[in-house]
Amino acid sequence: MTTENQTKTVGLCLSGGGAIGFAHIGVLKALEENGIQAEVVSGSSMGAIIGTLYSAGYSPEEMMQMIQEDRLYRVSKLMSFKPSFWKSGFSGHSTVEKLIHETIPHNSFEGLQRRMHVCVTNLTRMAWEIKNQGADLADWVAASSSIPGVFEAIEKDGAFYLDGGVLNNLPAQAIRPLCHTLIGVDVLPHIPPKKLKQPIDAITSCIRGIQHLNSAEGRSLCDFVIETTALKRYHEFRFDAYLRIYKQGYKDAVEYIQQHPEMLKR
């Protein structure tokens, strides 16, 4: 049964995608310009980072300022490299955690302006989970954005956690029951490869394909799915191209809204 609150609630689900996730900020800008404000948010990986900042009340302009100040920009800023290789990754989470602590001092889900749902992969159970309460927001956002083999796994509550996008890159399941209209933003849509010149090209295509498949259910639950074409020009570690990726996300969202005027009616 649909409640009165559900009939008025807009949900937003943001996918993972590394640097391509900067397109989320452009999408948010386009949504705001069209009067679309989400009250419930979910996200994996970079989608969890951007979604959390959005849920804390930061505007797209303020997020872009953070990037320009190198707080959310270079790979070297996001990763704190470690000299040893016997751990579960060669990079720590200090920068992501520091970003959340600095921008959201209360470090709690309950203190956010919007209800945020962070998707993480529980390696111990080999299942994706949603974290949406407690005063350890920075830990869960860092876990959700912990790319396997790059970041260390986070050990918490007797389990090991990594990037939510490993098992669910578009976690719409978490908020579908909470909202009437659900908008998904997928920055890693399926784009067939034109050339596979090197082994790394095949590996990248396989990883993207797996993430696209594990996003299928989430996509099907959304009323609208905005895709960005930034992946055609940039890859997940092109953090230096943040401005161009942001602009592409904005352009794609504006075009999508124009093609789907029913979004504004709902």
Image (cartoon, helix red, strand yellow):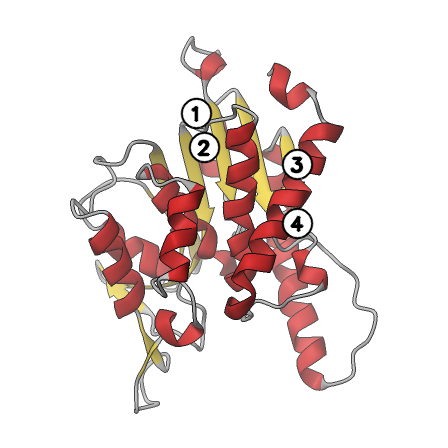
State left or right for residue 245 relative to residue 115.
right
Which tag, 2 or 4, sits closer to the chain's start?
2
Q: Residues within 10 Å of mark 4 (few under 14, many from 20)?
A: many
Res 145 quadrant in image:
bottom left
Vertical relation: 147 (above or below) 9: below
From the viewer's perspective, is 131 left or right of 44? left
Q: Position of residue 165 (x, y in %)?
A: 50, 57
**Residue sitting nearer the eye, 227 or 258:** 258
CA gap between label 2 and label 1 equals 5 Å
- Which residue occupies 34% across, 32% down? 114
Q: Position of residue 177 (x, y in %)?
A: 47, 26
Q: Is residue 115 above or below residue 240?
A: above
Could you say which disc has been placed on residue 228 in the image? Answer: 4
Question: In the rendered structure, which disc, 4 or 3, sits on the residue that comes first in sequence?
Answer: 4
Sequence-wise, the earlier of marks 3 and 2 is 2
Residue position marked by numbered label 3 in the rendering:
254
Which residue is more in the foreground, 224 or 28?
Answer: 28
Q: Secondary structure at mark 2?
A: loop
In percent of the image, x 51 and y 68: which residue is there?
239
Q: Residues within 10 Å of mark 2 (few under 14, many from 20)?
A: many
- 105 is higher (above) or lower (below) than 69: above
Of 66 and 203, the residue lying toward us: 66
Mark earlier in primary sequence (1, 3): 1
Q: Nearer the viewer, mark 4 or mark 3?
A: 3
The residue located at (62%, 68%) in the rendering is 235
Tag of residue 88: none
Residue on which the image places disc 1? 178
Q: Are marks 2 and 1 in contact (CB under 8 Å)?
A: yes
The amino acid type found where label 2 is placed reads Ile
Which three-letter amino acid code belongs to the residue tagged 3? Val
Residue identified by numbered label 2: 175
